[in-house]
Image: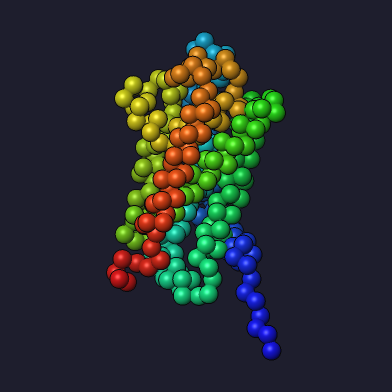
Amino acid sequence: MSSLAMPSTLRIGLSRGALELKGFVREREAMAFTFAVPIVLMLIFGTIFKGEIQGTGVDFRQYFAAGIIASGIASTTFISLGVGIAQERDDGTLKRLYGTPMPPSAYFIGKTITALVLSVTETVILFLLGHLMFGLKPPSTPERWLTFVWVFVAGVAVCTLLGIAVSSVPRSGRGAAAVLNVPYIVLQFLSGVYLTFTDLPKGVQEAGAVFPLKWICQGLRSALLPDSLLSAEPAHAWEHGRTALVLAAWGVAGFVLCLTTFRWKRRDDG
């Protein structure tokens, strides 16, 4: 009598992803917070700040909309995963999963699928809002579409890895949202989401350029906004090569941190 074969890791991961998405939809408060915050910020700032970025012919609201889309990617990956995993560790879910025959990698495949689906959904919502309210246009050429896709995918991948890695920082699930939202909010200001990046003090620009959100913002601007905006960019160029290198470096760093810091148990579990 032959034993039944275990499903493949990928199949289990896909099932985990579907389960994660169902759970997310059922938690309406979490779903509303994840999607509503970037939308509300776009509405508020888009109403307050108007006018052309000097010498570019680009409406600041379009510049801001591109930044909010990048910020939304970080929200659905870095914040959602970091907080969600910290809470699952705190309530013992991770410990129970680790004790099952499920390959550990299937858990992370499920989380990655969830992050990707939520990021795509949020990006579509924010783009449509930016299009209807501020005249934000889709990429105008195949090359710009390619840029949009690789920056989006790289941004999701990097922020997903960092979200998984940073989930070990909060001491409890209850305090995870507060702990992780502080650096997220600071990075939005450092990265030129709410202000034109070149209007920030030089020291702030240098600090922001260390982190991936600045480069995701810049990459999305290069895909969605005209080249006339280059006069308002720090290097007067889109710097696609540098953007790819910085995101790749953060991706490697995030992967290493995941391998070295991720915990399946609470600290007090030993």
Residue 115, percent across and down?
A: 55, 51
Q: State the residue in front, 90 or 26.
A: 90
Seen from this angle, which residue lies furthest front?
2
- In this image, 76 relative to 133: left or right? left
Q: Measuring from the top left, give residue 203's x and y in whole percent.
A: 31, 25
> Split into 4 quadrants, where in the image is the N terminus?
bottom right
Query: In the displayed structure, would residue 99 be above or below residue 243?
Result: below
- Please report the residue visible at 54 percent of the width from the left and 40 percent of the height from the top: 154
The colour scheme applied to this rendered structure is rainbow
Q: Which quarter of the figure is the C terminus placed in? A: bottom left
Residue sitting at the far bottom: 1
Residue 249 visible in the current orientation:
yes
Asked if residue 140 is positioned above or below residue 112 in the image, the reply reads: above
Front residue of 248/82: it is 248
**Front residue of this view, candidates 202 and 2:** 2
- Which residue: 53% across, 23% down? 238
Give above or below for 86 relative to 51.
Answer: below
Picture coordinates of residue 138 (x, y %)? 66, 29
* Residue 38 visible in rendering: no
Q: Residue at x 60, y 19 (%)?
A: 226
Q: Is residue 124 left or right of residue 48?
A: right
Q: Is residue 20 left or right of residue 158?
A: right
Q: Count how many numbered circles sit on residues in the image.
A: 0
Task: Using the rendered view, name the quadrant where residue 140 is placed.
Answer: top right
